[in-house]
Image: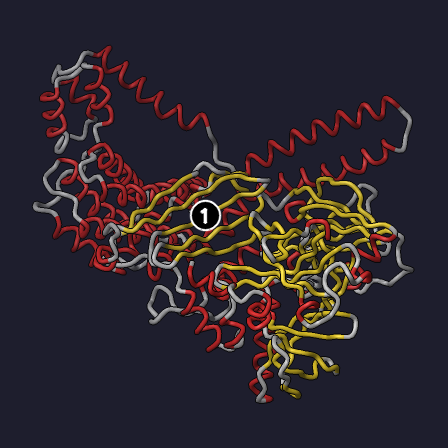
Amino acid sequence: MSVADTEIIKEFLVESYENLDLLDREFVALEREPAARDRIAAVFRTIHTIKGTAGFLGLPRLEALAHAGESVLSLLRDGDIDLTPSTTSALLSMVDGVRAMLKCLEASGNEGNETYASVIEILKAICERPATSDAPAPLLGEILLKAGAVDPVDLDAAIEQQKDDPRKIGEILLARNSVKPEALVDALRAQTDAHAGVSDSSIRVDVGLLDKLMNLVGELVLARNQILQFGAQRKDAAFVSTSQRLNLITTELQAGVMRTRMQPIANVWNRLPRVVRDLSVACGKQVRLELEGKETELDRTIIEAIKDPLTHIVRNAIDHGIETSSVRLAAGKSATGVLHLRAFHEGGQVNIEISDDGGGIDPDKVRKKAVQNGLVTADRALHMGDRELLRFIFMPGFSTADRVSNLSGRGVGMDVVRTNIEKIGGTVEVQSQLGHGASIKIKIPLTLAIIPALIVSSRGERFAIPQVSLRELVRLEGDQIRTGVERIHGVPVYRLRGKLLPLVYLHEVLHLVAEAPAATINIVVVRADDRQFGLVVDAVSDTEEIVVKPLGKELKSLSTFAGATIMGDGRVALILDVLGIAQRANVVSEVRDRSLAENAQESRVSGEEKQALLLFRVCKDSRMAIPLSLVARLEEFPRERLERAGAHDVIQYRGEILRLIDLRAMLGRSPIGEDEASGDLLQVVVSSENGRSVGLIVHRILDIVEESVAMKHRTSLQGILGAAIIQGKVTDLLDVHAAIRQADPDFFNQHDAA
């Protein structure tokens, strides 16, 4: 095969793949609008082009298959037959066969041995008469008709004559005196301009060339950073001016190259109508696909990475989410389910939402399956909220499907979704309302090549934190360090606007050489998965654009690093993988859930059931515990916010009036205001049940532990269940319900009345 032939085949493959993707969309659209003649004509022209080129290149099997499809389309175009679902399925099978032949041609240089005889027979059976017309679509004729330069009857006669006449349609019309020469010239010029308008406005560029260009721009950005840093140390005005000019040009060049790599998300979504159509037929359901934001752009590397996750989500939504028509009608819904995909830019990220109006995810099924799989104890699962339960669907091997089909149900889809999304620095979460549908929200960065990052240092080493993970910066000095950082369950935490923020010391996670405690603490608040935590570093520098360099194979196994970059002074800085650090420090839900599963397994082996407990002091010499499942939040309130409502202490809390119960007064200890050691802040354990909340005032919160509780001492004291040994110390177990009734006998009665 000559070089020229190779280039022709390469061009044929590129054009044909694009045309086949177009056909997938057009056939699905035709099912909704079977009378759209212009769409049928466009599909016919596409198949005719593929068939003609296949014949020219000597590909008889491909030509025969395309010819069979063209024959059906000819009848559809002429209105001799109607488009039915079975006809659409046959034509789509033809498209799949052509695609398979093209892949074989691309891989081995020939069309393969498969003839797709069964598909051809089905297509022939659809035709009411043998396909005898190889006439091209009257493109030129359409232009002449629109211009009023030819009579429709004369045009039809010329098209009929062309069946046995090798001449082009324009030559036949001239010979029949059906069109004036000047009108034909104008039509030909219009036809040429129409084709040139498309081809001249865009060119095809090899992806490898774009990647190489992107790498060169990355190196230029690194050189720019070095020059800017060098220029900042000089007093030469001319050098500084020149470096600033270089900075401007580099920034514009970088933006331009990035645009060449950006592709609309429609490149991924265009394959979904065909997927939805095939899955709907296979499942016996009616599904309407709605796409919003198809023009939203992403880097091509991100585009490739999200193809499989989106397909998995769509499969699950149709197979398990959207109900059959009969079930939907019985539930008062429309017979056709809706699958809605939306994409939009927000905060330097791309947000993708996939929602359906199906039956939603049953939290009770998730709870039962989580306990069955040993992911959580039965007691813990009973008190978990729906949002927390839904995280289990991303666990490996987890599925609530009652059956395993060839579409889904084996528990690998959603695990693959989260894994692939997290690999590109994104996050995924699921929301559901039983009976009304489910929604999956994905957040991913625009690009992975050149990104803004915050430069930090720890123990003399510099690191880069991708800006997409950053939330805010907090700096503690002097007494703020002593009073601001606490330890709960052995984990350092900081109360950020009333919420406990777990702290992770970077030098501890990376095992860097420790130094003397710093006079200040810099907390970089970051988000990983669905949780925020504070990353403690020695110093925070500025934000700058960095070029992401992949790690070598020796370092790829390190989950704490996402790559490396070269700084302005030529030194290498590692890029932190925030999710990997969070997992290593046990602050994200995945690790927490797995640790709970391990604890549950240990409990079963030992024959003891462990439960999570909150430890606190009611006064200086009294330790007390309550199940963590009864705790909604831990809060601190300034004493001056305390108010009275009737005979009760209350405080304004989240737009409501929160009833406060002083456990110290209940146990006969000093009430509010009489314990000078308690300070100006009230520590409150907020407990919620059935939509009502109450605040329990304690002296000090100590820890959160997970232990098996064996009652060692019973007591008749109201509000106390008894005593147990926890962490080697005698600890009273609080009966929360009894304590509330003792302080406010009507509390539950009011709730019941409501």
Q: Is residue 96 left or right of residue 670?
A: left
Q: Amino acid at mark 1?
A: Glu
Q: Position of residue 539 (x, y in %)?
A: 83, 49
SS for tag 1? strand
Question: Which residue sits at x=60%, y=51%?
Answer: 653
Percent position (x, y) of residue 590? Answer: 58, 65
Image position, residue 733 (x, y; %): 64, 77
Name the side, left or right, on which 86 lies relative to 497: left
Q: Label 1 neighbourhood size at 10 Å, few (<14), some (14-19), many (20+)? A: some
> Does 468 sit left or right of 751 as displayed?
right
Whether residue 56 appears in this view of the structure is no
- The extreme front residue here reads 647
Residue 159 in view, yes or no:
yes
Residue 668, picture quadrant: bottom right
Viewer-proximal residue among 194 and 737: 737
Image: 573 above or below 408: above
Quadrant of the image containing the C terminus? bottom left
Along the viewing direction, whichever of 181 and 478 lies nearer the viewer: 478
> Could you tell me which residue is drawn at 40 percent across and 56 percent down?
433
User: Residue 343 appears at what percent x and percent y?
Assistant: 46, 42
Q: Residue at x 45, y 48 (%)?
A: 353
Residue in the foreground of this view, choosing between 516 and 485: 485
- Residue placed under numbered mark 1 in the picture: 353
Number of numbered discs visible in the structure rendering: 1
